[in-house]
Image (cartoon, coloured by chain):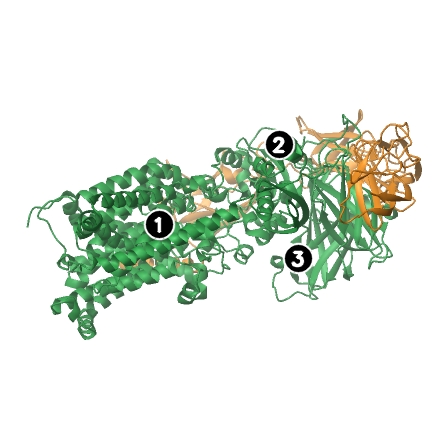
Amino acid sequence: MAASRTNKYLITAILLGIIFHGTSMFYTLERTYDALIHLFFANHYSMSWFEPWNYSWYTGFTVMGYPPLVHQSIGALSHIGGLKFGMFTVALIGVVLFITGVYRFTQVLIPNKKVAGYAAVLAVFSSSFVETLHIFGQLPSIIGISILLHTLPEIYIWLKTGSKGAFFKSLALLAVTVCSHHVTPIFGMIFFIFPLIGLVLMDASREQVNSDKEITFTVFLKTFWKHLKRILLFGGSSLVLIVGCILPYWINTKNNPITQVPIPHGSRDSFIEVTSSGLVFFVIPWGILLVFLPYFFYRYYSKRLLFFGIFFTLLFILGTGGTTVIPRYMLGENAFNILTLDRFTLWASIMALPVFGELCYRFVEGDYKDAFQKRFGPIIHRLTGGALAMLFILIGVFTITLGKFRPSQPDTINMLPIVNFLNEDDHDMWRYLPLGFGDQMAWLSAQTSATTVDGNYHSARRLPELTSRAVERLENSKYQGLEGIGSLQQFLTVPEKYHLKYVFSNDKFYDPLLYFTGWHRLSLLENGIMVWEKAGITPLPSLLPKDDVPLFQKLLWGIVPFSTVFIAIFLLLKSMWSRSFKVGKEYHPIYFSFQPVRKQNYRVIFIASAVWAVILTGIILFGVYHFYTANATQASAKNLVTAYYDALDFKEFERAHSYIDPESDYDISQFMLEISTSDGLLSSYAKMDSISVKIVEEKGPTALAYVAANWVTPLKLIKTNDTLSLRKDKGEWYILPKDIDPDIPPDQLVIESATSFYNHGKRKITTQKTHHEDVLKQPVIEVLSAKLVQLDTTYAIVGELQNVDNIPSDVSVTGILYDKENVEIARFNAKDVIKHKLLAKETTPYRIDFESIAWVDSEVIEPVNFSIQVKANVATSDLYQAAAPSSVKQEGAILDGFLFNQSSQAATIPQLLISYYDAEGGLLWVDAQYVDESVRQQRKRPFSLSLQINQIPKVLSSSLDNVSVNGLANSRISAKIVPNRNDNGKTESLIEVTNELYRFISITTNSYIGNPR
Amino acid sequence: MIKTLKHIKVSILFVLGVLLMACSNTPKTVSTTVTTERFKIEIPRDQQVSSNGINVNFKEYKLSQLESIRFIVSGTFGTSVLKPTEDSGLARVVIPSEISQIAGQLEWILMEHEHFLEKGDFRLMPTASLGTVENYLGPRSITASKRDNTMLVTVPTDSLDNMLPDDTAISMNHQFKGQTVKTPVKLKAGFGWKRIAAPLVTGRLSTGSTVGVISSKELVADVFPDIAQDFSINYERTHPFADGNELMSIKTSQIKDAQGNIMTDGTLVNFFIVDEKNNHWQTTSSTINGYAFAKILHPELPCTLSVNAVIKGMAESPKMTVDFKSIITEIPKAIFDNSTLKVGPLTSYLGQLVQDGVEVELQLNETSWILLTKDGYVSQELDSLKFPKGTYSLTVKTLGLESTYPITID
């Protein structure tokens, strides 16, 4: 045999891969979904290699929930050049391993070095690989599958020849796979190793007989019986490896079973219904491979590769997610809801690479080229080849830049100001919560020692508040509808439970929720992040609880994964050396004796491919047409209205203005002016959830559109009903502008005097604890009434309280329920049905609801008694009195009137707390209603609210005996501070209502000032 | 946690076992002789605390068995086992400074192996050199009433942070509005304390203490006003017309407590307003120098407003009534022109056009619209299909006036 020669194609592929991926990853990897999570884990290992407990997320979790090898590698490399250096290095290693892995895997299936070289080049631009690396950032998954591809040839050799060297090499490589990614080897066993065993048996059977046709089932069975020992030995050993290498992982999984309710994932959608998921999880990863599906099936269902055909089909079907019910049946309900199914498509597309390489080889320089040129001439052949190559690379390039065109992440946040803030003045002694950070929250966590209640690895969650909800992260809860907001509300309402004191808001959407749950703005950092703070939260104890694991687990976890790499390198050093530098003679592994017999029936496969291509083109054209008609905005009245609302929702006002009738003399500056003067919950803090447009009275060139839209806001769902007049001009529909409110405020220059407050905190610049002379006295609050009431099956505590001190106060009210044995059964805080910031002598009603997480035991919900704890701290901000209810009258269940803003601050979101009273003036219920639009300075905002209770709450208990304020008994406070309390203001504040279940109501206003001046 | 303990126990047993086996080969030389009389120490006397440690010398000792001697000392902060040392013929036990600088009772026991030899106790007294005077004052804000007081607590310490003995004389001082009170107090259990009754005037109370030559920091308490007393209100407006476009300001008198102290700035006052049709207005304002100003918009309809201001549960003003006159006497007749129904010009009390945004309700037979004026007019386009030619009954309601008349649409 001739001296070994370097495979040019492989060298080209590796160089291309390093150039293509190596340069682009610096722009993509940090913006992917997962890369920063792995970086966070890596940071953990770089700080404490052997300690699996991490306090940063979820009030503490164990990193034993994810195989450590990749994280440890990045962590180890980070000591050379920092965390990101480690990440990019590992990613680059992943690229090289993947390309070489495809090369070696292809040789097993199609024993031809040129074909393998082609496959390696194709692997570089494989859109599924590009997507997994540059969009998803799944480093462990890539390393896992790449090593698995390297393992397959060794397994083949062991099974075929019984070579002990190959046996140990295959096990060593498998161990590295196991330590990199847990799902890859488990499913890899099924989808890659099972068909490989089939392939070995086929090859062995082929040796027994003279032609492929003679391989009968009996022959196959006999061969199987002969190889059974090796198969079992390998199977048994790999099982031991899978369990043994990451034993702590399995122990942890057993001890802390995943209780998380399924979190929706795009890969489980029906790709026809949710086209965006179809694009990301089906069209992009398959890319141009879709065109050649007939060839793949044709080749994989040849006798030698039959088993790969079966498993390729299975992977293909599983990758289609929720489009059909088949994947759900195959995996079972449970696995279907936990697994992300995009990995199946990734594996299928990788499995397709060898035959795709073969196809290209045959087309470029093999028999297909001759056949094609004979029939169509060389020019068509070259043109076709060029076009397909361009298309293939373009899809790869498109995929890599997808994150740029359709950003899945918020803009890169400069973390330094946040890190500095947390380091300053012991701010890291409390937990923080980032909002609107996207996956960059992991990067923040990696840089600070402060901890958060949120996190970005849902399998590791332990707090029932998180596991009981299908919410990915609190940080992006606005994208998860009401459930997401509800989950966030729970954390913001009882922050003391988690020692949560700081919220970093990168999305003003959450700001109203923070305000109404009693948080206040602290400062705007120089990177534009608003810091919100909650008063009166105790710092974290210096010792935090953790689930410790035995020492042997820590040692296993810290030592085994890394040593698998060294063992694998040690075992494979020789073959790597000889293969890389081509020393010695050319060596052909055993599978090279099974060259494929290529049949010359070009017609069948060509016609099949052509028919398939036509069908595919048809589908694509239909899709494009459908996409066009659905998006040709002004062609139909319905599209126009939908597009107009879409533009408003995304704040693309110029586009919205382009839909307005050009003949109405309504220029963009007027339009923008009106937009800028409209503010409030609906126009500034709402995200459109759904819209239904009904076109009525379509008569020739005019029409009327009824638009019913649902908006998710941080505080409530808003349903709007609008009527728009439309006009058609030259085939295009336009919206006629609406009249604007002509109201003019009375004063040109508003002059207002007000008291403002400032608290120094520490007066001495020192890192010591605050001196006791700098600690302000907690303001004194008196609870005026408290009642435990029952409405249907829910319980609530309602009442009123007053800041009887002379300084403004921030109030948080905790209600505790007890059963008849006086055992505590529930505890929660007043959420938004209270005014949290009170001026001196100001009163507020409050209502404490007991949400599901408030209950100690969801079975026992029969409260008999209750107690209330009020915590007050000096407040210095958000004390504006901006909106005054005016001309209020009740008609039936509707309360009409307008809000007038007398102040010099615009009331962005006015809240009206409505208290309901019985005929004796006893408080029955409190309710919070939000006015959807803002009230600007000296302007009116009409409101019409429905009085909501349609049944009288049952009062179970009414007492002030068990009320404490700042740890003091409420009764002592009232005796000392206001001994002669009278009824002043009681009757005046009551508004009598007629024909309702209750007799009086009263209104307390509370306004969120979005932009204090 | 329990698992780890178990592991540790197992490993300890294992190590012990190995050690035992290793030791069993060598003959043991454990002395069991009791040498009771051969060790005597100089019994420590009561003394002052020391930051240099205390030496307890042996009067009698046997060097070879010094190793087996232990001196166990128990003080305020716990118990320590000390070993004697020998240096140029002098054996001694050194009680380290960590123990010797804390004042209090020290008990000691001298042991040889597990045999008790001697025991005793002595007291460590604070040094004469004074360290600091730590003061605590609370509550830090009080109200100017007989019901309230604040308490000053003084804890003087010596230079080694020990509390001073009982009956040490200290002077606890406070000042309010130039009046200084010095109260001699004797320490008890290390503390001196004094209740300071709240002055009946608002201001700042400052306090401090001295012990001998050393002094405390200044601590202050703010005296805030007591509960507000009833007050009065009056109003100011530019004109008496109900034009819906001018502000009326309601002003309270200076709100004070029973002693005449002005309410702290930022005290909230609620204003409740009701008209004769039982429409409600309410607004709030916080005081500045005891005065609260609230602004309300003039109503659009002529009415009589009844206003009162309260500090809830504490104080209120008498009711005050304010009349508003209509700005218009007559609504101009509507015109129908070019398929548009137009009402106007609406003019105000000087004959000027009413401001933009005045609400006008038009009712044409059964259909009604609520419109807002622009340049004195309101107009409504009529759909000729819905309103064919004919005579209709039109009702116009605005600014408290209403007129109904037939109108012909052609």
Quadrant (top left/top right/bottom left/bottom right) for the C terminus of chain A: top right
Q: Earlier in the sequence, mark 1 or mark 2?
A: 1
The kind of secondary structure element at disc 1 is helix
| Mark 3 crowd level (few <14, some 14–19, many ≥20, 10 Å Cα) | many
Which label is found at residue A668? Answer: 2
Residue topped by disc 1: A287
At 45% across and 58% down in the image, what residue appears?
A268
Task: Tell me residue A842's x, y (percent).
Answer: 78, 41
| For the residues bearing labels 1 and 3, Cβ distance under 8 angstroms | no
Q: Earlier in the sequence, mark 3 or mark 2?
A: 2
Give the tally of numbered discs: 3
Tell me what hue chain A is rendered in.
green
Identify residue type, mark 3: Phe
Is B166 displayed left or right of B119 in the figure?
right
Indicate whether A574 appears above or below A743: below
| Mark 2 crowd level (few <14, some 14–19, many ≥20, 10 Å Cα) | some
| Mark 1 crowd level (few <14, some 14–19, many ≥20, 10 Å Cα) | many
**Which is more foreground, mark 1 or mark 3?**
1
Residue topped by disc 3: A850
Chain designation of label 1: A
Q: Is residue B218 visible?
A: yes
Tell me what hue chain B is rendered in.
orange
Identify residue type, mark 2: Ile
Identify residue type, mark 1: Gly
Residue B209 lies in quadrant: top right
Q: Is residue A536 visible?
A: no
Query: Closer to the camera, A350 or A563?
Result: A350
Task: Tell me residue A564's x, y (percent).
Answer: 27, 52
Task: Tell me residue B235's x, y (percent).
Answer: 89, 32
**Which is more foreground, mark 1 or mark 2?**
2
**Which is more foreground, mark 3 or mark 2?**
2
Find the distance from the CA under tag 1 to the CA under tag 3. 51 Å
